[in-house]
Amino acid sequence: MGRKGPTPQPIAVLKAKGTINVTRANDPIADTNALQWVHNEVPSPPEDLNDVAKKMWTQQLMQSQKLYGYISFIDLTLFKEYCYVYSELEWLKENTKGRFYLDEKGAKKIDPLYMELNKLRKDFLRLSQEFGFSPSARTRIQLQQKPEEDKDIYSDGI
């Protein structure tokens, strides 16, 4: 089942509006200013991933690292699971012969690998939406803005 109710707003938005409830917003993990973002560098894939998962790791992070505030380093554990599910999905696509097979009595049965493939597709779509990798999920994403560097207003003279 999906989440119920409206999507909670980020702490920075609540602070800007002045409607923040500080007793509920003291979560240092939820405070996006404290997170380190995957930006301008792509971490190397974990060694325990297979080649297909490592390729997905690199491809997706190369695209998402271009946007500041898209994936943080704390998200990489779940992102690793996303890549693993993708590699399993690809393996099942290659090894599933079809939806049905005939058993020894000639009865038509659903292939267990096909059933597993459908389960993994659902998991993959769910994880894709967590990271905003689908068109509809991207419309709901609010990216963290890059912090402005302190600039000396008098650096170019008076």
Image (cartoon, rainbow, N blue to C red):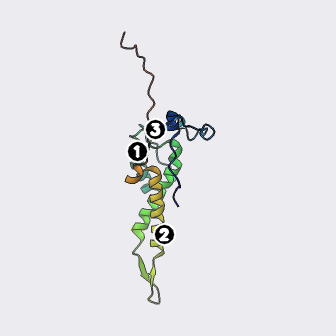
Q: Earlier in the sequence, mark 1 or mark 3?
A: 1
**Which amino acid type is shown beneath numbered disc 1?**
Ser
Task: Check the image and report above or below for 133 versus 153.
Answer: below
- Residue found at x 42% / y 38%: 68
The alpha-carbon separation of the residues under discs 1 and 3 comes to 13 Å
Do the residues under discs 1 and 3 have CB atoms within 8 angstroms?
no
Q: Between 33 and 40, which is closer to the camera in this rendering?
A: 33
Q: Is residue 61 visible?
A: yes
- Residue found at x 48% / y 66%: 119
Residue sitting farthest toward the bottom: 105
- Residue found at x 48% / y 69%: 116
Task: Check the image and report above or below for 143 versus 88.
Answer: above
Q: Residue 37's spot in the image, x, y percent?
A: 48, 38
Q: Is residue 148 left or right of residue 30?
A: left
The alpha-carbon separation of the residues under discs 3 and 2 comes to 37 Å
Which SS class for mark 2?
helix
- Residue found at x 44% / y 41%: 143
Q: Which residue is mark 1?
A: 64
1 or 3: mark nearer the eye: 3
Q: Residue 7's spot in the image, x, y percent?
A: 50, 49
Location of the C terminus (image quadrant)? top left
Which SS class for mark 3?
loop
Q: Which residue is mark 3?
A: 144
Q: Which residue is mark 2?
A: 116
